[in-house]
Amino acid sequence: MSDHVYKQIELTGSSTQSSDDAIRCAIAKASKTLRNLHWFQVTETRGQIENDAVVRWQVTIKVGLRIDD
């Protein structure tokens, strides 16, 4: 088994449904153009409020991409 090397990128996803959905949206979009997505780490969570209710979630994540051998 060989050791792996990763590149980190930062993404921010948004959703009107939930913070989990914002993460899923960011990963799904990134996976269309990037390969070997391997892990993520939430670094920031924000929300938008209108009329005393949460109307949008924004979640910033670091994503690790495994570099090919």
Image (spheres, helix red, strand yellow):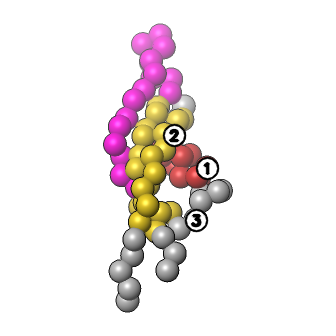
Badge 2 marks a residue whose secondary structure is: strand
In the image, residue 6 above or below residue 54:
below
* Residue 22 seen in the current view: no
- Mark 2 highlights which residue? 13
Q: Report if residue 10 lies within the magenta region.
A: no
Residue, disc 3: 35
Q: Quadrant of residue 32?
A: bottom right
N-terminal label among 2 and 3? 2
> Looking at the figure, which quarter contains the N terminus?
bottom left
- Could you tell me residue 8's position as x and y percent? 42, 56
| Amino acid on which the number 2 mark rests in the picture | Gly
Q: Which mark is residue 29?
A: 1
* Label 2 vs label 3, nearer the camera: 3
Query: Which amino acid is tagged 3?
Result: Arg
Q: Residue 34: x and y, percent?
A: 59, 59
Q: Secondary structure at mark 3?
A: loop
In percent of the image, x 48 and y 39: which residue is there?
Answer: 12
Whole-number angstrom distance, CA of label 2 to CA of label 1? 9 Å
Q: Along the polypeptide, which appears first: circle 3 or circle 1?
A: 1
Query: Mainly helix, strand or loop, the magenta region?
Result: strand
Is residue 39 in sight in this rendering?
Answer: yes
Q: Earlier in the sequence, mark 2 or mark 1?
A: 2
Q: In the depicted view, which residue is nearer to us: 63 or 53?
A: 63
